[in-house]
Every structure is written in structure tokens, then in C-alpha cells.
Image (tube, rainbow, N blue to C red):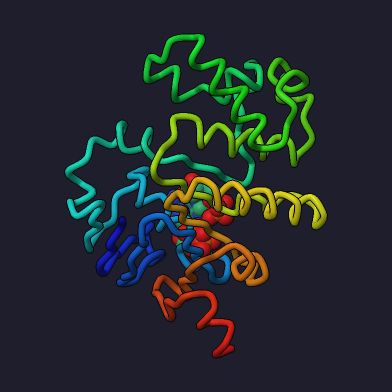
Amino acid sequence: MFECRNLVKRFGETVALDGTSFSIPEGRLTVLIGPSGCGKSTTLRILNRLIEPDGGEVLYRGRPLSSYDPVELRRSMGYVIQHIGLFPHWTVERNICTVPRLLGWPPERQRARALELLELVGLPPDEYARKMPHQLSGGEAQRVGVARALAADPPVILMDEPFGAADPLTRSRLQEEFLAIQRRLRKTVVFVTHDMGEAIRLGDRIILMREGRVVREAATEDLVRSG
Ligand code: ADP
Ligand code: ADP
């Protein structure tokens, strides 16, 4: 799905990516893992063209990423970050339908989709559709964030420490739930974390990064077997 070759990204003096190469297969959950500051988020933001690399190349579905319209590209990739940033003055339902609304779906279809997704992420629609973001717990807000990312059924989901702010119990519940969703939907997921337990639990494949480079890329079972 993605083929990244020799990505370089600098922020002033800081070299965030220093010749990063890896590939992301379709329909799998690939984890990017490494210590804080090694370039994981920068990599993710390059994949949806929130930022552009200074060097190297990304192919997406066999074509240069730069040949895609950035706005359309971002609508085709769900994005879930740590502090999910729901719009505070919109109901849960309206938040979930952000992209469908931009795409001009009829209101009834938006509504049906929101209810279906609330069900999928384990929030009873009758109870949650009309709530405002401030009425949600942290874990509930992250579930709504996942629902929002899935709303227009994008082929790619990018997740940047999505459960990082949750307490351990909530976090492991969110992991379980997301794994169950992913088993059904088989999206191409790129999941950033610095937690090896989370990486092993969720990832089909794991890419280890350090100081802006990929140091290892392997199927999770091979990585676990070889230690
Ligand atoms: P990670 O996600 O692995 O924690 P990041 O990709 O966020 O790492 O950051 C890699 C390096 O680039 C860090 O040193 C970070 O401070 C720096 N960096 C990231 N974004 C910016 C930015 N917008 N401006 C300046 N430096 C940045
Ligand atoms: P993460 O931990 O997920 O990588 P950060 O907290 O590092 O996220 O970054 C959040 C935002 O701050 C991003 O937009 C990133 O580009 C920016 N940023 C990160 N590091 C720096 C930095 N050293 N200087 C300026 N902006 C930064």
C-alpha cells in the first residue's frame, strides 16, 4: 500500500528522519515503534501529506504520493491521535460524520452511519449520539475518535498513540476492541506506539525505528520468536 524510500525530514537543526525506508502492506496492521523523538509521528504525517519530506519518496498504491490531491488523500485516510480533538460544540453524531458531511452524504445516510459506528465501537447509539464531547470519559472519546476515523470507510487508518492517554485498564479494553474491529474490517492500519506490549498485541508487522531510521522490520511472530 505504501512504499517509503530514503525519507529525510529536517526541522531546523533537528534531523527527524534520516533515510527511512519501509513498506506497509495492504489489509494489515503495521506498528511503528521506537523511543520518543525517533520520527514516528513525522513519518505518519508524511503518509497523509500533512507535511512533506525534504528527501526520498513515498509510493501509495504504486503512484507517487505527491501526485495525489492532499485534501482528497486525507479524506481517504482516517487519522486518530492521542488527544482526539473532537469539536466541542458538536454532538458525538456530528463529530463522527465530519468526513461524510464534507463528502456531501445525504443526512439520513450520515445518521445511519453514525449509529452503526457507535454500535461497532461499543457505545449504545441511543445513549451516545446526542451527547456532547465534554460528557464523555477519555476512553469513550477515543472510541468516538475511532468511529470518526472509520466514518467514510477509508482504506487506510493512521493511528498515533491513540490509546496513550488512557489508564491501563481502559487502554487494554480499547486495544481489545480495536483488534476485534480490525479483524472484521481488515483496514490498512499504521499504528504508532512506544509500548512494545501494545505493538506485539496489535501488530501483524512491526517496524522498529531509532533516530530517524528503520533498524528492523519483521512479522510480529518472527520478532517475538527471535527476541
Ligand atoms: P516521535 O513521534 O517518534 O516521538 P517525532 O516524529 O514527533 O518523533 O519527532 C522527531 C523529531 O523531530 C523530534 O526531535 C521532534 O522534536 C522533532 N519535530 C517533530 N515535529 C517538529 C516540528 N514541527 N518542528 C520542530 N521539530 C519537530
Ligand atoms: P507526538 O508525541 O505524537 O510526536 P508531539 O507532541 O511531538 O507529538 O508533536 C505535536 C505537534 O508539535 C506536532 O504538530 C509537531 O509537528 C510539533 N512539534 C513536535 N516537536 C516539536 C518541536 N521540537 N518544535 C516545534 N514543534 C514541534
**Along the line of sight, which residue is nearer the eye, 185 or 94?**
185
Q: Is residue 99 left or right of residue 167?
A: left
Q: Along the horizontal axis of the image, is 89 left or right of 210?
A: right
Quadrant occupied by the C terminus: bottom right
Residue 100, by quadrant, is top left
State the image coordinates of residue 155 (x, y, percent, origin top left): 39, 43
In-image side of 154 versus 63 (left or right): right
Q: Is residue 220 above or below residue 166?
A: below
| Residue 98 x/y as whole percent | 49, 23
Residue projecting furthest to the top: 107
Q: Position of residue 28 (x, y in %)?
A: 45, 59
Q: Residue at x 48, y 15 (%)?
A: 109
Q: Is residue 44 above or below residue 69?
A: below
Residue with the most extreme bottom position: 226
Q: Is residue 59 left or right of residue 119?
A: left
Residue 26 or residue 70, whichever sits in front = 26
x and y percent of residue 149 in the render?
51, 36
Above-or-below relation of 91 to 152: above
Quadrant placement of the N terminus:
bottom left
Q: Residue at x 39, y 74 (%)?
A: 213
Number of marks in the image? Answer: 0
User: Which residue appears at 38% of the width and 14% of the height?
Assistant: 104
Residue plotted at (51% across, 10% down) = 108
Closer to the camera in the image, 216 or 16: 216
**Quick one: which residue is furthest to the front in this view?**
184
